[in-house]
């Protein structure tokens, strides 16, 4: 199996910027929509880190910033990126 293309440190830096925005939205549906749009923009700017599946996002963030990951996916109303983006 190929290595995870998502760099945990870079992805967590993105999540750090996203967290206050997503929490301020106050709605899981709104947070998921905002995260989807912003993540698409991030991947476009970092094509070398294009995740194969949402599980790559979970793996990278669980290793590099597990508490932040939990906060982000909870704001979107889910328990993982895999469940958020299916």
Image: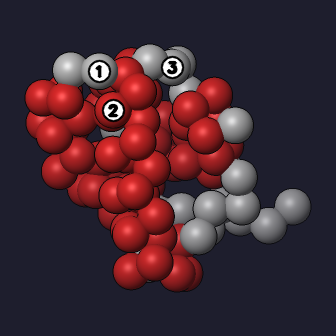
Callout 2 touching callout 1 (CB < 8 Å):
yes
Query: Where on the picture, by quarter, is residue 82?
Result: top right
From mark 1 to mark 3, how far is it between C-alphas?
12 Å
Label 2: few (<14), some or many (≥20) within 10 Å? some
Asked if 44 appears above or below 57 in the picture, the reply is below
Query: Where on the picture, by quarter, is residue 46?
Result: bottom left
SS for tag 3? loop
Query: Which comes before the other along the chain, label 3 or label 2?
Result: 2
The percent position of residue 34, horizontal first and vertical second, equals 33, 45
Label 2: which residue?
30
Asked if 80 appears above or below 5 in the picture, the reply is above
In the image, 30: left or right of 54? left
The percent position of residue 85, horizontal first and vertical second, equals 61, 40
Single out the mark in the foreground, 1 or 3.
1
Callout 1 touching callout 3 (CB < 8 Å):
no
From mark 2 to mark 1, how far is it between C-alphas?
5 Å
From mark 3 to mark 2, how far is it between C-alphas?
13 Å
Query: Where on the picture, by quarter, is residue 10?
Result: bottom left
Label 1: which residue?
27
Label 3: which residue?
78
């Amino acid at each position: 199996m190929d290595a995870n293309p998502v760099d945990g440190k870079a992805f967590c830096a993105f999540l750090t910027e996203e967290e206050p925005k997503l929490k301020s939205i106050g709605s899981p549906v709104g947070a998921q929509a905002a995260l989807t749009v912003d993540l698409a923009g991030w991947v476009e700017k970092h094509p070398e880190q294009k995740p194969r599946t949402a599980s790559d996002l979970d793996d990278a963030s669980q290793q590099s910033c597990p508490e932040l990951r939990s906060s982000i996916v909870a704001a979107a109303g889910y328990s993982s990126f895999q469940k958020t983006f299916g």
